[in-house]
Amino acid sequence: MTTTDPITAITAPDPGTPPVTVRREALYFAVRNGKLLLGAGIVAIFLLIGIIGPFLVDRPPMEYVGQPMMPPDGEYWLGTTTFGQDVLAQFVHGVRNAFVVGLLAGGLAALIGMVIGFVAGYRGGLVDEILNMLTNVVLVIPTLAVLLIINAYLGIRSVGMQALFIGLTSWPWVARAIRAQTFSLRSRDFVDLARLSGVRTGKIILREIAPNMSSYLFMTFILLFGSSILIASSLDFIGLGPTDGVSLGVMLNHANQWSALHLGMWWWFVPPGAAITAIVGALYVANVGLDEVFNPKLREL
Amino acid sequence: MRQYFGRKLLIYALTFFVAVTVNWMIPRFMPGDPVASMVARARISDPEAVAAMQQYYSNLFGFDQPILAQYFNFWGALFAGNFGISIWAYPLPVADVIMDAVPYSLGLLIPSILLSWFVGNWAGALAARRKILDNTVLPVGYVLTAMPYMWIAILLCWGFGVVFQVLPVAGGYSFAMQPNLSWEFVGSLFQHWLLPFVSLFLVALGGWAIGMRNMIIYELEADYSNYLAALGAPHRLIRRYAFRNAVLPQITGLALQLGVLVAGALVTEIVFSYPGLGSLILKAIQNQDFFLLQGTFLFIVLGVLIANFVIDVVYVIVDPRTRAGMTGATT
């Protein structure tokens, strides 16, 4: 679902250039990068749909408001479900929840991955051994299977809790990639200098090491954002989605469960999947664009 | 090499230990009383029946014993192949129910994983640094890899099964047939297998193609490629060397992606009502059959660990550096 190997999909940043010029240069290339603009544009459109949509479509998403099984028309732009629910209302709320899950789960996973990666890479030794072992174990366990068990038993039924558990299980590759980069940075002169001047470890990591891979950290967050949306939609589709609201995965689940396919109600199952594909695909494309912006080696292409 | 395998096996053993422990812990330490909630979910109002059910579940989990004994009993039962009795398929043991479903899941997973990996790598390698091909492979790859597995399955199912009505949309074989060894039955199996296979294949394909393309470009810019080019080596030779180096991270990537691929197969099976582990999980969740759910979970973990080990062995065969005891593999 994600690019095959996220670790290699993003090229490592080159530390050591002064930050101000880098920032100005990045902006210069960012506004000229087609991939970044296209990706960011699509994401922005869906973000707008998610933010404003629920206010414009004021029909409650799960209530039976109209005629059942109506194809799209002027009144219901995306038609209605077998029960007469407004598909458009479900759609805009679903898009909103996709962003919520992506932001919370992706953010949490990025945070955990960073902390573990930085600490393991900077400290080395026994701490590294233990954290590395932990990373490898979580990396091997099939995430969705664990989430299935947790969700089924705990009966997780809110978007926030779902995001929390997705975040708790999808950090390992980030931790590993950041650990490798921290390794290569920690013996640099400027880090040694900071250490010699008695700066505390936490501050060295935050002030000296992290800024040197800030572009990389941002890109991992984008990848995690996309993959979290995909994981959440799978969980929702299996029937472990939020019950206090609607999501794109829940829409697909209902459509499949009430045989929208066999009744030919394409307006029920095409939009949610298309939205997920568009959001996640746009995130990936924007990510490639960002990579080209930050990494001069890739620019000529 | 011994150290390499030793480390790997240690990680796998540890992972299995963690998985089993999690599996044991969740029903016992989750907030609230699992027995009470299971009884409540059964929606029985007769107090006598409620008491009987409570008794039954407590015995089943072995709650009356000290916590450490419960834990060891759990491991003991596991090694005896005893996963409990399925509630959905009562009175069949969970292990039997799972064993019936496993061949279908493997039959879907193994061909789709291998084929998408080979075709994806080939397409990606072909596309790298070739403008026209690159401009088609890359966008198609990104769309495919961003698609949720169940959505592409739904689209294929709707398109070929409902609109054109050329392929069956549900089940592992025709409902009118009994499993037997005849060409007719094999044909039916194949017809039902085709669409789930294609949808799994397509989604995985995009990721491999993009990954390979990026790796080849990286390798073509490496010093050895430039050196070869400077010596005047033919383009084909340089590409071949680049390919051999670029394939290594893709093998590691295969190990990393196994969990995602299995998850994709689960939801695809649900769309097509394919009688594999995915459909089993759906049944288990719908019927609150926790033993079945936990058994399936352990099976999936075990399968992924075995597949990981197979990939490790392949890696050692493919990458001579691991054999020489140098650090080659990073996983």
Image (cartoon, coloured by chain):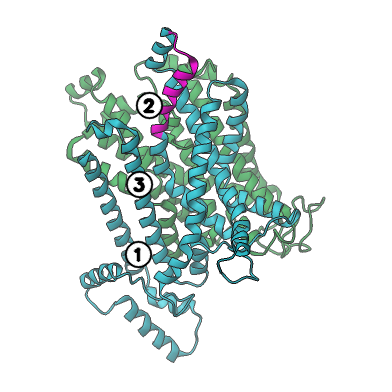
Location of the C terminus of chain A by quadrant is top right
- Check residue B310 in the rendering and tell me which mark sits there, or answer none: 3
**Colour chosen for chain B:** cyan
Q: What distance separates the C-alpha of mark 1 from that of mark 2?
A: 38 Å
The secondary structure type at the circle numbered 3 is helix
Chain of the residue where label 1 is placed in the rendered structure:
B
The amino acid type, in three-letter code, at marker 1 is Ile
Task: Report x, y in % for residue A272.
Answer: 64, 49
Is residue A112 among the parts visible in the rendering? Answer: no
Q: In the figure, A204 relative to B66: above or below? A: above
Q: Mark 2 is on which residue type?
A: Met
Whether residue A137 appears in this view of the structure is yes
Q: Residues within 10 Å of mark 1 (few under 14, many from 20)?
A: some
Looking at the rendered image, the disc whose residue lies closer to the viewer, 1 or 2, is: 1
Q: Colour of chain A?
A: green
**Residue depicted at x 26% and y 37%:** A120
* SS type, badge 1: helix
Q: Which residue is mark 1?
A: B26
Q: Position of residue B292 (x, y in %)?
A: 43, 69
The residue positioned 54% from the left and 64% from the top of the image is B275
Tag 3 subunit: B
Location of residue B271 (image quadrant): bottom right
Dominant secondary structure of the residues highlighted in magenta in the image: helix
A53 relative position to B68: left or right: right
Rendered location of residue B53, percent (x, y) = 41, 84
Instruction: Establish whether labels 1 and 2 are both on one chain.
Output: no
What's the magenta region?
B232-249
Q: Which residue is mark 2?
A: A213
Identify whether B218 is placed above or below A154: above
| B246 magenta-colored | yes
Residue type at the position of mark 3: Val
